[in-house]
Amino acid sequence: MGFFYLVRRIGLLCPSPSPDGQKNKYLRDLCDSVVKNNKSKKQAILKTAARLFAAQGFEATTTSQIAREAGATEPLIYYHFKGKDDLFTSIIDATFSEYFSRIDELEKNPDSPFGRIQKLIELQCDIAEEMPDEVQLIANLTLLKIAKRSLKW
């Protein structure tokens, strides 16, 4: 490993670990801090976008509004996501990923059938409480899909 490794996500050169573990500690700590901040900014963008998409709809929400309310810059949004569509898809994917991973955990539960149903209901309530904007966004999509189907009649 060379003296520097490239942290592509943040575009900084950070020193690689030294044999004694002490050299360049400040720079490594700084790089670790920047990487952590970058991840938290991405999460802030995702949460803000979910809230705005749920409240205003996809079309009425702009990337500049998301950036402003997330405390980020618009170029940072485009650094993490290909565009507004990709940001929207990432929110939906993350929401369903979280939901299905928690469903998988329920399946491992050896409860009685009634106990499993009770746990499933509790999971639904927990998800709605923990991710209200994401749940609203999915509900809006479902209603839109139903409305489009009924218009075809």
Image (cartoon, rainbow, N blue to C red):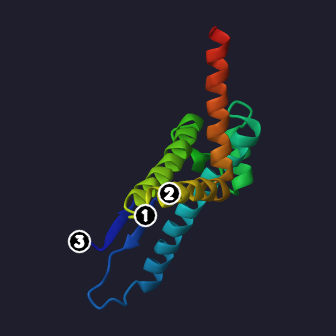
Q: Which residue is mark 2?
A: 114
* Side of 96 where 130 appears, left or right: right
Question: Dots 2 and 1: beta carbons under 8 Å?
Answer: yes
Mark 2 surroundings within 10 Å by alpha-carbon count, few (fewer than 14), some (14 through 19), many (20 or more): few
Mark 1 surroundings within 10 Å by alpha-carbon count, few (fewer than 14), some (14 through 19), many (20 or more): few
x and y percentages locating residue 3 in the rendered image: 30, 74
Check residue 111 in the rendering and tell me which mark sits there, or answer none. Answer: 1
Q: Residue furthest left?
A: 1
Q: Foreground residue, 69 or 11?
A: 69
Quarter of the N terminus within the rendering: bottom left
Q: What type is the residue that disc 3 sits on? A: Met
Quarter of the C terminus within the rendering: top right
Q: CA distance from mark 3 to mark 2?
A: 56 Å
Answer yes or no: is residue 8 visible. no
Answer yes or no: is residue 135 visible. yes
The answer to whether residue 34 is above or below residue 76 is: below
Question: Dots 1 and 3: beta carbons under 8 Å?
Answer: no
Q: Which residue is mark 3?
A: 1
Q: Which residue is painted at 45% across and 54% down in the image? A: 103
Q: Secondary structure at mark 3?
A: loop
Q: Which residue is painted at 45% across and 50% down in the image? A: 100
Q: How many marks?
A: 3
Q: CA distance from mark 2 to mark 1?
A: 8 Å
Q: What type is the residue that disc 1 sits on? A: Asp
